Amino acid sequence: MASSIPITQPTDASRRRALGRMGSLSALGALGTTGLLAGCETTGAGSGAGTGKPHRIDVHHHLVPPSYAEDLVKRGGPRPIRWSAAASIEDMDRSGIALSLTSLVQPAVWFGDVALGRRLARESNEYAAKLAIDHPGRFGTFATLPLPDPEGSLKEIAYCLDVLKAEGFCLMTSYNGRYLGHSSFTPVLEELDRRSAVVYTHPLTADCCRNVVPGVPDSAIEYATDTTRTMASLLFSGAAARFPNIRWIWSHSGGTAPFLLSRFQYQEQTMKDAKRVLPNGVMHELAKFHYDMAQGNHPGALDALARIAPVSQYLYGTDFPFRFGGEVNKALADYPFTPAQRMAIERGNALRLIPSLKGKAS
């Protein structure tokens, strides 16, 4: 079903205005932001740094536009983690990463204000596009959308794909307690499906589950769990099957979903309308999804992931600046992947998923 919300096609004038605004951002590229985002942590650069010509493609690499950081502070929120383009490139070079697909740090741009969400999304997406222009071959873009504002999101999809030439989009796993399979997001999913878009997702703490375990940050448990919740939402609402052209990427090796496989299968077996909701079965959909390796690269996670998806669906991810490439490199080197499998995870699978990267990630 086509969306009832009109999508304005970009004009040559809009392209010129966009490039003009992007040009004004170039002076900000070298600026960093300070402090830590609540619930996140940093580690040392680790070992296993890349050697030889950089070849890896990082699909889980955050950025923090200076204007976004200042907006969060003005709203009384925490100042995000320190970030700069120079720091990104330094770790990429040290870790053998040729190109990183950037995504806005959580909590992204939705704070219950439509106008604010649209402004933050546009500014952040233009900043990311300018970053890629200023550093040819080093960055691509997973653009942010102002969900749960469907009209604004549809306009931003058109702008980011047709004007900014983004490689895909980044969505949070939940918005105001609603997961991505919720019917209110249907117009946006329809357009993403029509566009055969790549959609990378990043978790955050659900409103239901803050400070559940005293002394344990929400990110330690709730982030991986929120990824699983939104996967279940898409699967068991039927959205995953209804929108088969969306190419989903799940952070952290799918969160806790690989460990809950038998429960997902039982849910499918006991659903009265399973054939309508999941006509090809839950395993078919899980095997189609893509999974990045950031913080999900230890043997237990990789063993479990192998039960739901083939290596062709694994993608290299670091979670920079919260974690670093050396940590991922060492974990992948220590796991009994074949050299061909390791190269597929580090580069080949991303090129197959996003063919336009072939001209960037030399």
Image: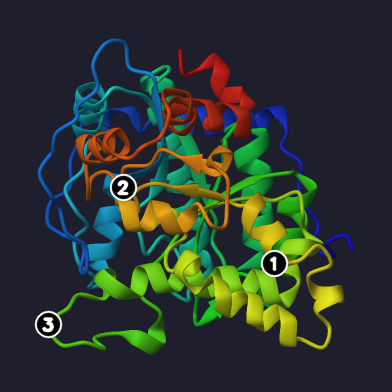
Residue identified by numbered label 3: 215
Give the side of residue 253 with respect to residue 88, left or right.
right
- In this rendering, does residue 148 appear at all? no
Q: Judge depth for marks 3 and 1 and give the one in front.
A: 1
Amino acid type indicated by mark 3: Gly
Give the side of residue 103 with respect to residue 76, left or right.
right
Give the side of residue 135 with respect to residue 19, left or right.
left
* 3D distance between C-alphas at marks 3 and 1: 36 Å
- In this rendering, does residue 81 appear at all? yes
- Seen in the picture, residue 330 relative to 137 is either above or below; the reply is below
Residue 319 - label: 2
Secondary-structure class at tag 2: loop
Whichever of callouts 2 and 3 sits on the residue coming sooner in the sequence is 3
* 3D distance between C-alphas at marks 2 and 3: 23 Å
Residue 282 - label: 1
Amino acid type indicated by mark 1: Val
Instruction: Name the foreground residue: 229 vs 25.
Output: 229
Q: Position of residue 96 (x, y in %)?
A: 28, 22
Q: Give the class, few, some or many, for how many residues have Cα within 10 Å of label 1's Cα (few <14, many ≥20).
A: many
Amino acid type indicated by mark 2: Asp
- Residue at 71%, 78% in the rendered image: 268
Quadrant, the C terminus: top left
* 3D distance between C-alphas at marks 1 and 2: 28 Å
